[in-house]
Amino acid sequence: MTVRDPGEAETIVQLEPQELLDAMDRLRAGQLSRRKFIVRAAAMGLSMTTIGALIQACTSTATTAPTTAAPATAAPATAAPTAAPTAAPTTGKIIAFSWPYLAAEVAQPLLEAAEAQAKVRGYEYLKCGIKEAKLDQQLAEINQWIAMGVTGITILPIDANAMGPVVEKAHQSGVQAVAGYADHIPSEDGWMGWNDAQGAGIVAGLATLHVLNNYGGVARIAALTDSPLTQRSKRRVMDCIQLIIDGVPQGELVVHEEAVFAADALTKTQQILQAHPDINVIICVADDGCSGVVQGMKLAGKKPEDIWVAGYDGAKQPLTMVKTGEMVGAVAALPLVGVGNMAIDLPADLIEGKGVKNRMIDYEVVTNGDDAKIDELLAVYE
């Protein structure tokens, strides 16, 4: 892939996404100095803003600060072994996991890992059972768990600010540990989340290269997020888009719509492309939405190479589409087994008085051509 340097019409700059990913891997492993990385990235045409974000993504320890509680030092997550766990004796203690997005493809491997880890740790396990990802249903179920006398709860909040009263009630009722997940919640005892600065930085770098290579340095961007805008949407999508805008000669956020999952993303993509047919970058808060985006592109007569698409989590269909080329773009995937394990380990450690209170998980970002890495990520669905 090539692009003409806008300052020198005769210069052809070679830009390869895999070259960038390899350089980032070497920087992360300590095999490449920051100075050499800056030289290489600058030669690829990346701006210093984007290069700085990539260096931070590769070399910084996770330190995202909460909005409601001061964190302890964050610790990296390690994925649990794939061998079947041996269950520890049940202690009568219960951990509940409020993960309300049960329609998402990532739900099954993540929640199965959590249930297995609860047995390993000697806790009974209560999983989310609400029919729709709606705040009133999530709050009602958490209140039921509190009334049952659970020992600990991990909450992925639909609305973080709305969790304050229910967390206070949990503490007053004797719940020993309430952990926030992804978004910080008021009065949380601990927190686990994703290294969104790392994921967004890498996604932005890949998007920037693609725009410079294929779209003449012009990025016409659409954002698909939840509404109201959550902390995770800001970090995953809006911060990523700002890095892209800073890294290309002409970048603009043209439209911002509410759509998280495939069905809504399909509808919104059709509407967006009808109103703005020149959109060439779409960033989704969840990669489940990427499936709807790709379908909407097809219905609008767009080819995969016409729009660079990215999303977060590691759902089966988007990973497969990136591998086959049906989707041109990237997926910032999470180690789903490790996430499920951590959803139990964090409250269990808080109850037992050990471990750090705040923990963060890095993404594995894959793009077209990363077949081996994609196969590894898809293995959790087998």
Image (spheres, helix red, strand yellow):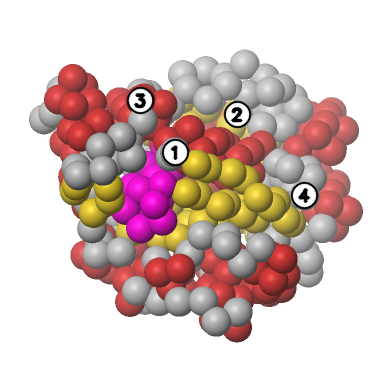
The residue tagged 4 is 227
| Mark number, residue 190 | 2
| Mark number, residue 223 | none
Tell me if 206 is positioned left or right of 263 in this view: left
Residue 248 percent across, percent down from the top left: 43, 39
Mark 2 residue type: Gly
Residue lying at 56% horizontally and 52% vertically, measured from the top left: 220
Counting residues from the start of the chain, the first of labels 1 and 4 encountered is 4
Report if the CB atoms under discs 1 and 3 are less than 8 Å apart: no
Q: Nearer the viewer, mark 3 or mark 4?
A: 3
Q: Nearer the viewer, mark 2 or mark 4?
A: 4
Residue lying at 27% horizontally and 47% vertically, measured from the top left: 4
Tell me if 166 is positioned left or right of 27 in this view: right
Counting residues from the start of the chain, the first of labels 2 and 1 encountered is 2
Tell me if 41 is positioned left or right of 247 in this view: left
Q: In front here: 99 or 266?
A: 266
Extent of the magenta region: 199-217
| Mark number, residue 48 | 3
Mark 4 residue type: Ser
Counting residues from the start of the chain, the first of labels 1 and 3 encountered is 3
The residue tagged 1 is 249
Q: Residues within 10 Å of mark 4 (few under 14, many from 20)?
A: few
